[in-house]
Image: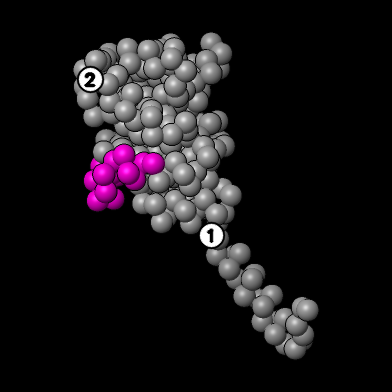
Amino acid sequence: MKFFVDTADVNEIRELSETGLLDGVTTNPSLIMKSGRPILEVTKEICEIVDGPVSAEVTAVEFKEMMREADILSKIADNIAIKVPLTMDGLKACKALTESGRMVNVTLCFSANQALLAAKAGATFISPFIGRLDDMGIDGMELIAEIRTIYDNYGYDTEILAASIRSVNHVKQAALIGADVATVPPAVLKALVKHPLTDKGLEAFLADWAKTGQKIG
């Protein structure tokens, strides 16, 4: 499974990139707002840190304006993935952008039917929103499983990018089902390494080592 981080915080991205665990970044208008920086400036800096796909989202809702914005965003760096909403105009833009050789992330997916359409439009990534479905009392993981089955049935190359992830358990479940990518907040990605028995074991090892009075080197 690939790990993308869902943030526009350059400091967080740089820190996580140094671990070697980061495969890409996803941003959206809300995350850009939180960064407090111009979208072109912050996105360019992110692309300089991360070699993998960096999703930059259009804000237009009509095809022609989506394509105009996509053209601007694409010029930021070669690793930009244009993010478009799962609407008819968004799917039309997805097809056009894919045919021009650009990566496309189709976002705001909440049903298997929507994911099927995105794959047919040639999306590089489909972003089903797990947490938001959970908020409505619907099991978001069922959607991931449905999409996995459909894509496997027909051999679609579109990668399932599990989004709106709220917990480490979401990550585990998405991996078990077979999502290709999980895009997670920095805090969740850092939490994946934690386990109380790891902490307890390390504490015991260090205590025993201190009793030996030895040093390595």
Pick the front one: 197 or 78: 78
Pick the front one: 53 or 200: 53
Q: Is residue 108 left or right of residue 208?
A: left
Element on which disc 2 rests: helix
Q: Residues within 10 Å of mark 1 (few under 14, many from 20)?
A: few
Work out whether 212 lies above or below 153. Answer: below
38 falls in the magenta region: yes
Q: Which mark is on residue 67?
A: none
What's under tag 1, amino acid-wise? Lys
Which residue in the structure is indicated by mark 2? 65
Count of numbered circles on the image: 2
Quarter of the figure with the N terminus: top right
Residue occupying the point 48% across, 56% down: 15
Residue occupying the point 37% across, 12% down: 96
Q: Tell me which segment is drawn in magenta.
A: 30-44
Cα separation, mark 1 vs mark 2, equals: 44 Å
Work out whether 210 lies above or below 107. Answer: below
Pick the front one: 144 or 137: 144
26 falls in the magenta region: no
Percent across and percent down for residue 98 are: 43, 16
Percent across and percent down for residue 127 are: 39, 29
Q: Can residue 68 be seen?
A: yes
Element on which disc 1 rests: loop
Which comes before the other along the chain, label 1 or label 2? 2
Which residue in the structure is indicated by mark 1? 194
What's under tag 2, amino acid-wise? Glu
Percent across and percent down for residue 27 are: 35, 39
Residue occupying the point 42% across, 29% down: 81
